[in-house]
Image (cartoon, rainbow, N blue to C red):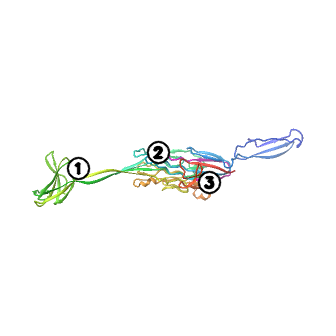
Amino acid sequence: MDIDWISISPQNGAAGQNPVAFQLVAENETFEDKQLTVRAVCGDKYKDMTLVLKGKTFPIGTVWNFDYTGGVQQITLPKGKYKLQCWGAQGGNVTGTYAVNGSKGGYSEGVLTLTKTTKLYVFVGGQGTSYTSAASQTSTSVVNGGWNGGGAGVRTARYSSGDTDGRSFPRGGGGATDISTVTSSMSYSSGRTNRDSASLLARCIVAGGGAGASARYTVTIETTTGNELVGTYTGTTGTSISSYDKVSYYKVVARIPCTANTVYSATVLQGNSYVFEVYDSNDSTWKQSGSLNSQITTKYDGTLRLIVLDDSSNVTVSASLYIKTTTTSNSTSSSKSSGAQQGGGTSGKGQYPGTQTSAGSGGAFGLGASQSSTNYRYCGGGGGGGWYGGGTGKSDSSASYVNYSGGGSGFVNTSANAASRPSGYTGLQLDSGTTKDGSTSFESTSGGTETGHSGNGYARITVLSQ
């Protein structure tokens, strides 16, 4: 109905003799009250009456639920008092051989009084993308973080050096769930959603997302060396020779077949020193290989003789002959993230959580850090989205870094939290509210309670009064 006033005139007689009755039927579908003026006219006299068409309202207890859709949802509310609830999304899971679940999301609730009709935009966070793991996994492509700020991960990060090869499987962080008075375009870039700054600065309530899970597989090549005893040999010196360090006498105490590229060593049990010689059948000569008292690596197949030197004749000398042995084996180990990097609360959980005033390592306002490294052995999962996003870390030396990540923080814009509002903030102020991290118990979306929120995020608005 779009008229502002109605004029009524009696058809016959003087005023009061033929009263005029009328019925006004109208629906006011707007949320604002509409005022109508009715004028009764008789000749040159009239009288005005004001009628008020009440704007559309919702019964106390009306509930709107917002599940994850991967897009911005909106609702227009009339003035009144409302309860707002948000649940943050869980981080992505590692599936397959080294399966482990991402950290859980947090929870925020508050009471908001609207003094005029207001349009709200609801951003429900998505769980970080899950992906498989295996020792044979080599793909380094991006694993998306959860919609609305979850940091990205990669399918495999790998680094091999020396005797150690390590692989990590970091997954994307969970997205935050929040309510704002400004909408935004939303698109993925390098595995993380982009959102307009004005929309982030207009959020009035936020539930943080949990960090993505991570697992690692490490193989270390272990090499063990030793000596295998060939035998202990004895002989009596008596042959004079002057070519070995001016020693007058020597004795060949061992003569054995040898093969190329074999390491031999000796221990002289009696005598001054020793030297090796190898017989080369190609030219029928003995060839010294190595200096005095040193091991020998044979260059070719033939016959090896061990000569023990002594400066006296007719002396019994003895020596033990050894072959060097090398044993190689693989040692494997693995570990997984603990799931203790939950989102929500005034500070998320983990080594690099988002707080009320700062992001975790690599994170930002509203955005969890992406784990984009593909050449490290040990990587934490992507950070959770939140008021401020959680961070992530990496290392080649410390396997514990699969746990080095953080959940995003929650936030409720009350007067008590004014110090946490960044420059340019435009969000609505709530009457009251609290935020809890995913390690605590809070209301479940389906009734009862839960400790941390699993899966995609969720939001709910309930009418308290109008």
**Residue named by callout 3:** 110
- Judged from the image, the secondary structure of the residue bearing numbered disc 1 is loop
* Residue 353 is inside the magenta segment: no
The quadrant of the image that shows the N terminus is top right
Distance between mark 3 and mark 2 Cα atoms:
35 Å
* Mark with earlier residue (3, 1): 3
Q: Is residue 380 left or right of residue 69?
A: left
Crowding at dot 2, Cα within 10 Å, few <14 / some 14-19 / many 20+, comes out as some
- Judged from the image, the secondary structure of the residue bearing numbered disc 3 is strand
* Towards the viewer: 444 or 308: 444
Q: Is residue 180 left or right of residue 311?
A: right
Please state which amino acid type lies under the numbered disc 1: Thr
Q: Mainly helix, strand or loop, the magenta region?
A: strand
* Towards the viewer: 295 or 17: 295
**Residue named by callout 1:** 262
The magenta stretch is: 108-132
Q: Position of residue 337 (x, y in %)?
A: 46, 52
**Residue named by callout 2:** 131
* Residue 118 is inside the magenta segment: yes
Q: Position of residue 206 (x, y in %)?
A: 57, 52
- Judged from the image, the secondary structure of the residue bearing numbered disc 2 is strand
User: Quadrant of residue 282 in the image?
Assistant: top left
**As drawn, 24 above or below 442:** above
Please state which amino acid type lies under the numbered disc 3: Gly
Please state which amino acid type lies under the numbered disc 2: Tyr
* Mark with earlier residue (3, 2): 3
Distance between mark 2 and mark 1 Cα atoms:
48 Å
